[in-house]
Amino acid sequence: MTEPLIFELGAPGRKGYTLPAPDVPAEPLEEMIPARYLRRTPANLPEVSEPDVIRHFTHLSQMNYSIDSGFYPLGSCTMKYNPKVNEVAASLPGFRDIHPLQPESTVQGALRLMYELQELLGAIAGMDAFTLQPAAGAHGELTGLFIIQAYLRSKGEHRDEVIAPNSSHGTNPASAAMARAKLVTVGTDARGRVDIEELRRLVSDRTAALMLTNPNTLGLFEEDVEEMARIVHEAGGLMYYDGANLNAIMGKARPGDMGFDVVHLNLHKTFTTPHGGGGPGAGPVGVKEFLRPFLPVPIVERADAGYILQEDLPQTIGKVRSFYGNFAMLVRAYTYIREMGRQGLTQVSEDAVLAANYLRARLQDLYEAPFPGPNMHEVVLSARRQKAQGARALDIAKRLMDYGFHAPTIYFPLTVEEALMIEPTETENKGTLDAFIEAMRAIAGEAAENPEIVRGAPHDAPVSRLDEARAARQPDLRWRPAEEASA
Ligand SMILES: *Cc1c(COP(=O)(O)O)cnc(C)c1O
């Protein structure tokens, strides 16, 4: 399973096209381009035919793993299948071929889609107004914190602390740091929920916000969320909802009803816009009415003459992204929501939760479940027992590749030793879940009897164990011609 570089393919003179010889006399190149601009030696480019190129890149794509090629239970990432009808909608010429600087009157359809998406997300999350600008969840968090800070400033309040649970996603403390807030960490109780007594002690007149995801990163519902909202609001702080886990509760519960003032949603998780590889994504931010004046501009509004880009929000935090957000992602998410409808989205959450609990029920005899269930959309197991036998969570993740599966998220949340965080999503059928369960059970057996085979995995991948830290920081991506490489 290796593939040569494209420079190593082909042969001198081979081309990817054939054009008929021109039937008009051509001017000599030297007369069209001044001699000093002409190359003296031809560029060192691959000389390949069209099939060479297509096969090369197809082979490369097959060395990768994607949701279109198999089960991808990467916890917290909601790697559900992305329906292809979304792509059809996003490539309609009326959406694809427009320019962000066109006059509003010529892009009414696009503006209507954005307006309706704002309304739909508002209905799903229980919020009053939305901005579609932020390009990712983390970007939404930062935007939301800016909005909260602008609101507090407008009231003459100086609150510099943001509270987040110790199980929170790494972007929460990172966003707090980028917003120049002081991070205060609240612990987790024996049931895997926020330690509410500790929260009571931590809030003060310095609290700007509590950042919370519900269900939390352990896949557990925070039943005391209303009490937490009361505690934070009574202290004068605001409630920020990290909506990356919304896939668990659509049609069942709404962050707006739980007491949250600001939310971000990950369209590239819950709403089937493709993700991975760093983007593009979309992390719209919704707010309660009293925060609307602080939203980034423009937001899309409906006026008598049609849809408009409203720039006139006197207390706006300004722009957080060029133009209006990742528009093609908005088209995909809108298509998905309209296709599913209220009932469909409710079923999505029911099936996602059912799948996670099925995995838990069929794996918890072999892998420790550190907290009591039932779970929501994902389950966090621990490979502590397997570690004692000689195979760590990392080894199990690598071994899953030999069985044809993408690995779950590992070593997150940080509060669980040897964490294996599994999020099956609703788009996988029982047969796929059963095959994954069988693989996990087989690996548990290997860990007990023959841990070397797990520690040495993957055995069938193009590359085996990389130095994870060095591979991320010094990726070896550049091809050098033979003479330069030997020099
Ligand atoms: C994915 C995720 C985020 C961040 O979203 P990005 O789009 O990757 O920036 C934040 N919180 C949780 C719980 C997440 O799963």
Image (cartoon, rainbow, N blue to C red):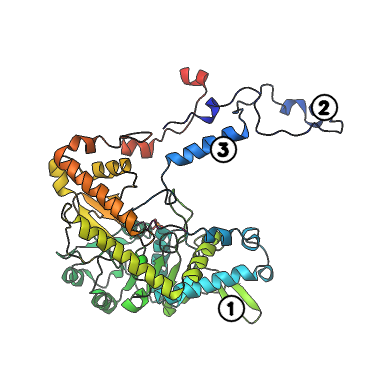
Name the residue carrying label 3: 54
User: In the rendered structure, does residue 96 fall within the stretch colored magenta?
Assistant: no
Which residue is at 48% across, 31% downward?
478
Q: Which mark is residue 28?
A: 2
- Please determine whether, in this image, residue 332 is positioned above or below residue 69: below
Q: Point out the quarter of the image occupied by ligand 1.
A: bottom left
Left or right? Give the position of 106 relative to 256. right
Q: Which mark is residue 434?
A: none
**Residue 202: x, y in percent?**
21, 68
Residue 175 in sight in this render: yes
Mark 3 nearby-residue class (10 Å; few <14, some 14–19, many ≥20): few
Q: Are marks 2 and 3 in contact (CB under 8 Å)?
A: no
Name the mark nearer the viewer: 1 or 3.
3
Task: Write down the region rendered in magenta.
Answer: 77-82
**Circle 2: residue type:** Pro
**Circle 1: residue type:** Arg
**Residue 378: x, y in percent?**
29, 60
Q: Disc 1 to disc 3, how far (Cα)?
A: 47 Å
Q: Earlier along the polypeptide chain: callout 2 or callout 3?
A: 2
Q: Disc 2 to disc 1, how far (Cα)?
A: 59 Å
Where residue 259 sits, quadrant-wise, is bottom left
- Please determine whether, in this image, residue 216 is positioned above or below residue 129: above
**Residue 39: x, y in percent?**
69, 25
